[in-house]
Image: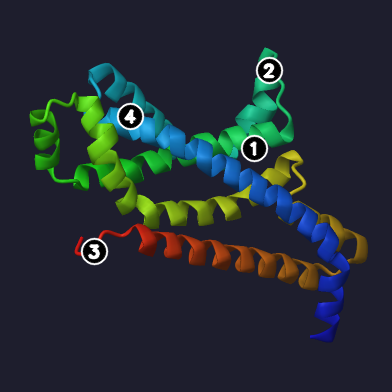
Amino acid sequence: MSHFLHVFIQGFPLLIGGLKFTLILASVSIVIGFIIGVFIAIERVYGRKISYGLSTAYVEIIRGTPLLVQLFILYFSLPQIGIHLSPLAAAIISFSLNSGAYQAEYIRGALQAVEKGQMRAALSLGMTKWQAVRMVILPQALRKVLPSWTNEFVYLIKYTSLAYLVGVPELTAQGEFFASRNFEFMNVFLSVALLYLIVIFIITWAFSAVEKRVRVPGI
């Protein structure tokens, strides 16, 4: 145990530097993915045939292909047609697009869970369909989707380790770099796992607090 603590303290500055990249990557991707997810979900529930078809195709393509393949396409394949992305940019774009597809399905389910009578009531008050969605339906749906959004953020935190494969110096990459210098692979990767666990525990606790705060009593 003392040896593990020694290795953990020795590698802590390097691992914290990687953790910063992990949190930036996950936070930016979850926000962009949320914006994508809201628009895609609305189009899948309330859109016309063309927008419904395009949004459905996006969701099925993204969910039907591995995240790692999507990342490799952006980073290794796009340069062949003259588009060069930095490792961080490729990771953010791929994670955002991937998260957007999954969040769209969470939000779509939440939108459909809102009683249909609320839309009719909003229309009877003179609102347009899109005003009703934005002001009546969507706020209720977002309350319902919070648990799923928490899971998505947790998944993204762990998926950021894939960015190591294209050269992003996130937590796993820094752990591998530190372990390769001192050959303490067991203790270093236990330290990496511990940091992931602490971060995910904090995120889960924070979202649980938000969920309780916005919950409507009796619903």
User: Left or right of 107: which side holds 218?
Assistant: left
Q: Earlier in the sequence, mark 1 or mark 3?
A: 1
What residue appears at the point 66 percent right and 46 percent down from the top-left corner? 24
Q: CA distance from mark 1 to mark 3?
A: 40 Å
Q: Earlier in the sequence, mark 4 or mark 1?
A: 4
Looking at the rendered structure, the secondary structure element under dot 4 is helix
Q: Earlier in the sequence, mark 3 or mark 2?
A: 2
Q: Which residue is mark 3?
A: 217
195 or 177: which is nearer to us?
A: 195
Q: Which mark is residue 56?
A: 4
Closer mark to the observer between disc 4 and disc 3? 3
Q: CA distance from mark 4 to mark 1?
A: 23 Å
> The residue under label 1 is which amino acid type?
Ala
Closer mark to the observer between disc 1 and disc 3? 3
Query: Is there any visible trace of residue 38 in the rendered image?
Result: yes
> Around disc 2, counting alpha carbons within 10 Å, would you say few (fewer than 14), some (14 to 19), or many (20 or more)?
few
Q: Earlier in the sequence, mark 2 or mark 1?
A: 2
> The residue under label 2 is which amino acid type?
Ile
User: Left or right of 127: which side holds 81?
Assistant: right
Q: Which residue is mark 1?
A: 91
> The residue under label 3 is which amino acid type?
Pro
Asked if the residue under mark 1 is in contact with the one under mark 2, i.e. CB atoms within 8 Å, the reply is no
Q: Which residue is mark 2?
A: 83
Q: CA distance from mark 4 to mark 2?
A: 26 Å
Q: Earlier in the sequence, mark 4 or mark 3?
A: 4
Looking at the rendering, which quadrant does residue 130 occupy? top left
What residue appears at the point 74 percent right and 30 percent down from the top-left corner? 86
